[in-house]
Image (cartoon, rainbow, N blue to C red):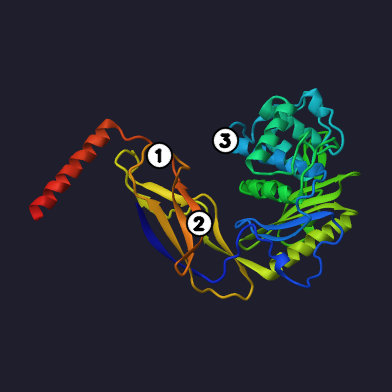
Amino acid sequence: MLRKITILTMILFLLFPQTNIWANEEGSSELVESAKSAMLLEVDTGTILYDKDPHKRLPPASMTKLMSMLLIMEELDKGSITLEETIQVSEYAASMGGSQIYLEPFEEMTVEDLLKAVAVASANDATVALAERISVTEQAFIDRMNERASELGLENTNFVNSTGLPAENQYSSAHDMARIAQELLHHEEITDYTKIYEDYLRQDTDDEFWLVNTNRLVKFYQGVDGLKTGYTSEAKYCLTATAKRGDMRVVSVVMGAETPQKRNADITSMLDYAYGHYELHQLHAKDDELYHWQHIKADNDYLVAAPKQNISMLLEKGENISDYRTEVSVDSSDEWPLAKGDEVGKIEIYKEEQLVKDYPLTIKEEIKDASVWTLWKRMMNQLHHRDVMSNLN
């Protein structure tokens, strides 16, 4: 049994997720000229705005760290680690070559500074230090990276290390990198680090280290605030960039460009296209309280349902608001137990009477079982209410 509460929201044109919009335009010049593979993705709706050979397996170089950062952010959210925690660096982590902050064996550094070193300077030693803190060994962390890739449905990704250093059988694709970035950006705090252009570690010591962002676009392109560059002689020049203007955030991925200049040109070409042709209309923000109800078995006065992601519509520029509406459908059964995050209904988008798309509606807050005393009081109140209504009749 469903109760429907119509929310007055009208929209004209919905672009379906997973649709390659660019492919529908005839006679268009190629957006990406240099890179072997590319993809342009709008984050909220998941709409693919452009791609070029997006499933081609290529070495991702340091873009591998997108998955490493995703796991780090997930552990921070769980509370398994904290930003203030100090980590002692192992000899193995300190031995990493390539991009690094020259950690010494047994040196101590906070999780936040190590994360900053990964996000800004692509530090391999900092990446492994964090991996070991989370999973004890880098190999166990790599296993979790591959498990997470599988959970995300990524079919063209395999990790052999956590850093992106050259390794046989380490590969990904522009599509998979875009999806990892999309998931990472659900942790909005990550851009607090990836948008930093320059900073310092070990300040006021003899070992002060200057961090400079390997992604120059964070300084030179409006709205860019991440995410990760990559380069090896095999991978060539790679970049997964993200930009946000207004409510619209996009991810732009380039793999296998011949020079950093061509890489950046391909990225900016895709970003220009996205912001020149589309705009995002946010209907409901993540965690907006869209429905309240009482449950006799819950200690909470009211249960609250909310979307677990932004509910947005991607519109072509020039399109006008028209005949789309959203409805909230909530399961009215007395199912129990319920917990934070449980799906209890849907937010449905309609054009006239046709359902176009729906999003899950979930329990927003922790729920506690009502005590015996609370249950007894509620039952007495209900009986009293029935008696009053009976007398009125």
Quadrant of the rendered image containing residue 28:
bottom right
- Pointer 3 with pointer 2, Cβ within 8 A: no
**CA separation, marks 1 and 2?**
21 Å
Q: Which residue is mark 1?
A: 338
Q: Which residue is mark 2?
A: 358
Check the image and report above or below for 347 versus 62.
Answer: below
Label 1: few (<14), some (14–19) or many (≥20) C-alpha neighbours in 10 Å: some
Label 3: few (<14), some (14–19) or many (≥20) C-alpha neighbours in 10 Å: few
**CA separation, marks 3 and 2?**
28 Å
Q: Which residue is mark 3?
A: 78
| Residue under the point 72% across and 32% down | 142
**CA separation, marks 1 and 3?**
20 Å
Whole-percent x and y of residue 81?
62, 32
- Pointer 1 with pointer 2, Cβ within 8 A: no
Among numbered discs 1 and 2, the one appearing first in the sequence:
1
Of tags 3 and 2, the one toward the viewer is 2
